[in-house]
Image (spheres, grey):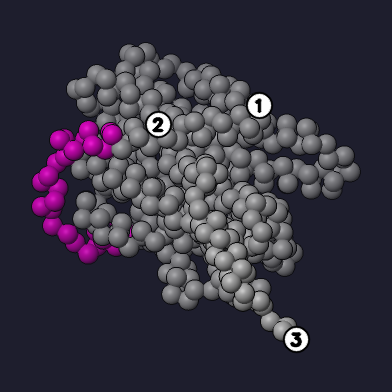
Amino acid sequence: MNHGRSNSPQDLQSHDVQCQDDMAWHLADTKWMLSMVGTAVGAGILYLPIGAGVYGIWPLLGLAVICTPMVLLPHRNLTRFCLHARAAGGNLTDIIQQAFPVRAARILVAVCFLAIFPNLLLYATGITNVTASFLEHQLNFEVVNRSWLVLAVMSAVVGVLICGESWILRVASSLVVPLGIVLFVLSLYLIPQWHWELLQQPVHMKDFEQTLFTVTPLLVFAFNHSPVCPAVARSYFSSHRSVNSAQVKADQTHFYAAGLMLLLTLFFVISCVMTLSPEQIIYAQQENLPALSVLAEVTDNHLFSIVAPMIAFLAILSSFFGFYIGAIEVLNSGFQRLFVRVGLKPDRNLIRAASLVTVTISCCVVAIANWSVLEIMEAVVAPMIAIMLFFIPVISFYRSERMKPLRRLSADVYVLLMGTVAVTGYLFSKLLG
């Protein structure tokens, strides 16, 4: 009696067909790839040239080489972690609660919240500043009261949020392709304005160290599309016959998404850094503005001065919607536990309303205060993202025997090292400075 697996020609042919089908590219894969790119290519990429260009072009190019795998490996790890967890069909909060002890899970859920929610506050500030800059410099309209501008902008944004997740996804996904094309075209457009003398600047080791610790947290922020990863895992888990098949397809989607992000982001950042002068970069930091808004203020091309701020606005808005979905998921879970604890019935509509009100009020307060986007990115958001992306999945791989096949020693060491740089980068950049 044969107790092993049948190796008949029919079975082998069926297995080959299934493997080919797992690797075949479908429309759903394209949608998920664009969702990853759309979530990442937003405010982060627009502010990245301002933070990355301070120390010159050569340290930036060296860091780009070192950090290239950082775009793919951590997000792939997070999706694999979500796929192989017992709660593979749940959200990230459920997965963490099942993968870690109770006390550790509470801390890690709080970390995930801090990795996602503050992004909305930064984007609200970014949208307001881009709008104010556009009104003042392109339309010659003086913004007398910032509070009224914030309320007007956030009212329009909340109007989309009230329509529900399907509308949010529809608006966000519709922005991805045109934004990517326009950012690529803008990068090409800036080439004749490059300051080629920047390539002749001397390179100092201190500049590279400063760039490493200052820019790595910004890169973590700029490439971050972690809110999409649990949804990707759920989708492929439900549509494939096994976790391994779902992992193969998710890995493939992550690979193409990472390549597209690198092409768009690095080309745009290098093009902006080669175009902007050091004085303009410092001005952007002081005024809390993204790169395109500064370029729009100094250009002689009237069309570019109109289009650039609009692109910046739409790019930040796209990321806002992408992170809202992840933030609202964590907020809903928190309010549900709070309602149960105080003895209230966890009504779904009431919980959703409470989460939306929390997001709206928080965004308005921070946008009016006009906190420094780069400072919050480096000091708060990037370290929390790094813990969620770089540490939680890898630690899970080595804690659980079920996830032992996911261990990749060299890749895991790289991820942990870069995660350590991202977490400690803000502190070390201040010490080195």
Q: Is residue 35 magenta?
A: no
Residue 308 visible within the image: yes
Residue beneath label 1, please? 162
Q: Is residue 72 left or right of residue 102?
A: left
Q: Where 430 falls versus 275 (above or below)?
A: below
Query: Mark 2 belongs to which amino acid?
Result: Pro
- Magenta stretch secondary structure, dominant: helix
- Which mark sits nearer the N-terminus, 3 or 2? 3
For residue 279, which numbered disc appears in the image?
none
Give the magenta-colored segment's residue range: 185-213
- Residue 430 lies, in percent from the top left, at 37, 56
- Which mark sits nearer the N-terminus, 3 or 1? 3
CB of mark 3 within 8 Å of CB of mark 1?
no
> In the image, what residue occupies the spot 14% across and 48% down?
198
- Residue 65 lies, in percent from the top left, at 30, 60
Q: Where 190 falls versus 13 (above or below)?
A: above
For residue 1, which numbered disc appears in the image?
3
Q: Is residue 251 left or right of residue 11?
A: left
Query: Mark 3 belongs to which amino acid?
Result: Met
